Image (cartoon, rainbow, N blue to C red):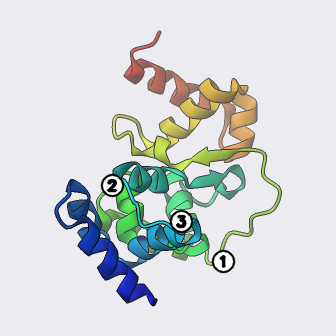
Amino acid sequence: MNIKDKKKEVFDNYKESNLYHHLKNLDNEELIRILIKHLKKDTNNISLEDLDSDKNSETIPDTIFNKKLTVLESIVKYLKENLNFSYKYIAISINRDVRNIWQIYNTSKHKLGEKFVIKDYEFLIPLSIFSNRKLSMQENLVFYLKQKFNLSYHKIATMIHRDDRTVWTVYQKAKRKHGEK
């Protein structure tokens, strides 16, 4: 059975359900990833949880951050070039507008032409933390690293190639936005 037949079969099985609405709104690249995942499992049962977990299962290595690119530029460039995600999928994953993602990616290509080479990394950061629009991308990252791993400001600053004082300030802003003192 080829992919086109499998896609039709899945759509026919779920046409009457709420899941159909979610499936039909995915572009082919995203749908193929989900279908391949389920072909490997040898099952036709796809749930809304599968769609959500598939989007939230991506992680970003801590080694992609550098001085030349902002946190957002680094993430978009990594997702586009290293993981071959579509602009739409990136936008949905980090809760941003697809047109902004396109612009951010093009800017990052000009600033840093080469693809990221992922070597040894210490931390994998879940993509899902960046969907919080109340915080900037840098605030999301610093807040996550400080809260989850209790890293020092210096360790975070070294990891993301920023000044220690900048990291402290970003963390304090993120704490205030979260309602913590």
The residue located at (57%, 59%) in the rendering is 69
Asked whether residue 85 is in view, the answer is: yes
Residue type (three-letter) at the residue carrying disc 2: Arg
Report the residue marked by disc 3: 79
Q: Is there CB contact under 8 Å for labels 3 and 2?
A: no
Residue 22 lies in quadrant:
bottom left
Report the residue marked by disc 1: 114
As drawn, is 152 to the left or to the right of 31? Answer: right
Q: Determine the secondary structure under disc 1.
A: loop
Q: Is the residue marked by circle 3 packed among few (<14), some (14-19), or many (20+) residues within 10 Å?
A: many
Query: In the rendered view, would you say 7 is above or below 89?
Result: below
Query: In the rendered view, would you say 70 is above or below 3?
Result: above
Q: Earlier in the sequence, mark 1 or mark 2?
A: 2
Distance from label 1 to label 2 (Cα)?
Answer: 24 Å
Which one is nearer the viewer's eye here, 26 or 139? 26
The residue located at (25%, 65%) in the rendering is 14
The nearer-to-camera label among 3 and 1 is 3
Q: Determine the secondary structure under disc 2.
A: loop
Distance from label 3 to label 2 (Cα)?
Answer: 14 Å
Which one is nearer the viewer's eye here, 31 or 154? 31
Distance from label 3 to label 1 (Cα)?
Answer: 14 Å
Q: Determine the secondary structure under disc 3.
A: helix
As drawn, is 7 to the left or to the right of 84? Answer: left
Residue type (three-letter) at the residue carrying disc 3: Leu
State the residue lying farthest toward the left. 16
Report the residue marked by disc 2: 96
Which one is nearer the viewer's eye here, 21 or 15? 15
Residue 38 point in image, percent of width and height: 50, 67
State the residue lying farthest toward the right. 120
